[in-house]
Amino acid sequence: MEVCSNVHQIRINFHVTDQIERYVYMYLITGRRCCLIDAGVAGCEDSIAEYMRQIGRSPDEIDALFLTHAHPDHIGGASALRQITGCNVYAPEAEREWIEDIGVQFEKRPIPNFYTLAGASVMVDVPVREGSIIRPGEGVTIRVLETSGHSAGSVSYVFEEAGVVFTGDAIPARDDLPILTDISGSMRSIQTLQTLEHIRYCCPAWDQIYEGSGITEALRRSGALLDKLKQCVLRVEVLYPDRTEAEKMEAVKAHMGWSHLATNPLFAATIKACIE
């Protein structure tokens, strides 16, 4: 789907388990050459190639791959894309180890079907950090924002010429359980995004695209949600000190109005992040 001139959204559907179906959005920047924001899950390179053919482009035009963070649904296609295109890989310096050795990531975050989703390790050509400026091609300037919280070193990328920010999973998706490692960090990231000027489109990896005043409202809503969640977790800790962690998690879901949502085991880390 075309977001605006020179920016396209590509949706990748996948299964975490046979019962849990998810999706993730990647973004393609086109110009004289092309850049890709995130790499989806392993095997998605065929979907990328098909989309590019539909718009009259080819995968071998991809010169740069920008990874927002190290989770499997964002790095899974990176190794194959690197082999196919020879592109340079840009990724957060703080998460470089998890990308260059996915076994290290699995030891610390063993999600179901990890290797099926994450594919293979890939070397990072250019580690990025807050304030990094990259010009991968003519008419394309990418500025890096540190937007941790969902993961320890998540970044967002601002495509300056188009007024587009690609936020990965920095903004909690509506109608789903937020997955966080540092709620204070996530709140700071929302505040960072709120200070951006001249942004026309906000492009998350796990939510709808926001534009204009919708960006302001989405960020306001997200900040309020995180604050409400933190207060809810602390209240549950006081009300039910003797309950198991699983029972407390269900109590939080009930108080937040999320009982209808399937429990994601990673939500336990979010609960912990609200307490620490």
Image (tube, rainbow, N blue to C red):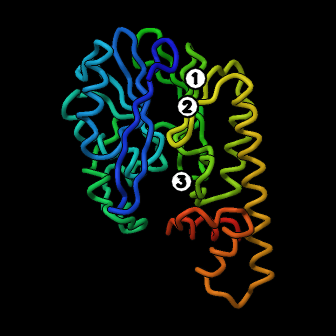
Element class at badge 1 = strand
Q: Which residue is mark 2?
A: 203
> What's the residue at 72%, 39% (across, down)?
219
User: Considering only order in the chain, which callout, 3 or 1, is on the residue closer to the N terminus?
Assistant: 3
User: Considering only order in the chain, which callout, 3 or 2, is on the residue closer to the N terminus?
Assistant: 3
Marks 1 and 3: which is nearer the front? 1
Residue neighbourhood size for the residue with mark 3, other residues' Cα within 10 Å, grouped as few (<14), some (14–19), many (≥20): many
User: Considering only order in the chain, which callout, 2 or 1, is on the residue closer to the N terminus?
Assistant: 1
Residue 208: quadrant of the picture: top right
Residue 173 location in percent, x, y? 60, 47
Residue 229 location in percent, x, y? 73, 61
Q: Which residue is mark 3?
A: 151
Give the quarter of the figure containing the N terminus: top left
Name, please, the residue furthest toward the front. 260
> What's the residue at 50%, 39% (across, down)?
205
Marks 2 and 3: which is nearer the front? 2
**Are the residues flagged by discs 1 and 2 in contact, CB closer than 8 Å?**
yes
> What's the residue at 51%, 65% (across, down)?
264
Observer-nearest of 128 and 200: 200
What is the three-letter code of the residue carrying label 2? Cys
Element class at badge 3 = loop
Element class at badge 2 = strand
Residue 276 visible in this rendered orientation of the protein: no
> What's the residue at 37%, 40% (across, down)?
12
What is the three-letter code of the residue carrying label 3? Ser
Give the quarter of the figure containing the C terminus: bottom right
Observer-nearest of 33 and 46: 46
Decide if residue 89 is on the left or right side of residue 256: left
Position of 73 relative to 219 (above/below): below
